[in-house]
């Protein structure tokens, strides 16, 4: 299993541009998450999904959108990029059906985004 | 609302010395608690978790953590630090609804030779 994969690894955007961060997991996990990590801070939840077709906001959703059309994929869309969105973005997944790994989240390697 | 406080943004120890990273949590329900490690330019890797089975939890790489309800603490320890332990460590608490994690601000562990 590849686990959780994210693309791209790095990206530089100009203010006002848009982009999509890709996230794919091959573990058949029903829960997926997007977090952002700012320097010296812990991760903060942007959006999450409990299954295909179901998404909801986290603590810091402004400026982002998500969709979940399949179990495997959970893309994060940035519209009208702003310098405040400069961060490292992590995708994670977990399963509610495997008791041995209950509540454990598996993280991708991250996407480092700079908006200038 | 849940919260996690990690005391000490930077901890430096000598190789072979005891590692102690502090974590206190706030939760209105019995918590699920985690420690994750992040090596430079990498994602987060699960070290260990507490899910109310045993108060002393053993994880990977020789780390362990003790859940103390009376102190609302979940401190991470390792008897003897190794150079490869140098990384950032995050304590996190999970809610039972969204199953999302609330993270502390992290502790960067430096190991001196």
Image (tube, rainbow, N blue to C red):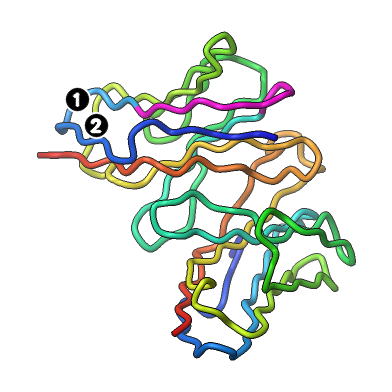
Which residue is labeled 2 in the image?
B81
User: In this rendering, does residue B7 appear at all?
Assistant: yes
- Tell me the crowding category of disc 2: few under 14, some 14 to 19, or many 20 or more residues within 10 angstroms, Cα based: many
Instruction: Tell me what residue is drawn at x 80 percent, y 55 percent.
Output: A30
Q: Which mark is residue B47?
A: none
Residue A44 versus residue A97: which sits nearer the camera? Answer: A44
Q: Tags 2 and 1 in contact by the CB under 8 Å rule? A: yes
Residue B66 versus residue A5: which sits nearer the camera? Answer: B66
The stretch in magenta equals B21-31
Q: Which mark is residue B17?
A: 1
| In the rendered image, residues at marks 2 and 1 fall on the same chain | yes
Q: Is residue A51 left or right of residue A75?
A: right
Give the quarter of the figure containing the C terminus of chain B.
top left
Is residue A70 positioned above or below A8 on the image? above
User: In this rendering, does residue A1 appear at all?
Assistant: no
Residue A2 versus residue B94: which sits nearer the camera? Answer: B94
Chain of the residue displaying label 2: B
Instruction: Tell me what residue is drawn at x 59 percent, y 89 percent.
Output: A16
Q: Position of residue A5 (x, y in %)?
A: 59, 69
């Amino acid at each position: 299993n590849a686990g959780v994969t994210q693309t791209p690894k790095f990206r530089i955007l100009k203010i006002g541009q848009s982009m999509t961060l890709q996230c794919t997991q091959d573990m058949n996990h029903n829960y997926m998450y997007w977090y952002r990590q700012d320097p010296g801070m812990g991760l903060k939840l942007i959006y999450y999904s409990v299954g295909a077709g179901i998404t909801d906001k986290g603590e810091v959703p402004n400026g982002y959108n998500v969709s979940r059309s399949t179990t495997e994929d959970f893309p994060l869309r940035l519209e009208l990029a702003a310098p405040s969105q400069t961060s490292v973005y992590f995708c994670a997944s977990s399963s509610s059906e495997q008791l041995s790994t209950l509540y454990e989240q598996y993280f991708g390697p991250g996407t480092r985004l700079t908006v200038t | 609302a849940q919260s996690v406080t990690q005391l000490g943004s930077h901890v430096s120890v000598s190789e072979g010395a005891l590692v102690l990273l502090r974590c206190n949590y706030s939760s209105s329900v019995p918590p699920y608690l985690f420690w994750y490690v992040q090596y430079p330019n990498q994602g987060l890797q699960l070290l260990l978790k507490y899910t109310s089975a045993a108060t002393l939890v053993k994880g990977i790489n020789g780390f362990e953590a003790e859940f103390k309800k009376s102190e609302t603490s979940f401190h991470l320890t390792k008897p003897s630090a190794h150079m490869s332990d140098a990384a950032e460590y995050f304590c996190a608490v999970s809610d039972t609804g969204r199953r999302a994690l609330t993270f502390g601000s992290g502790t960067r562990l430096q190991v001196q030779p």
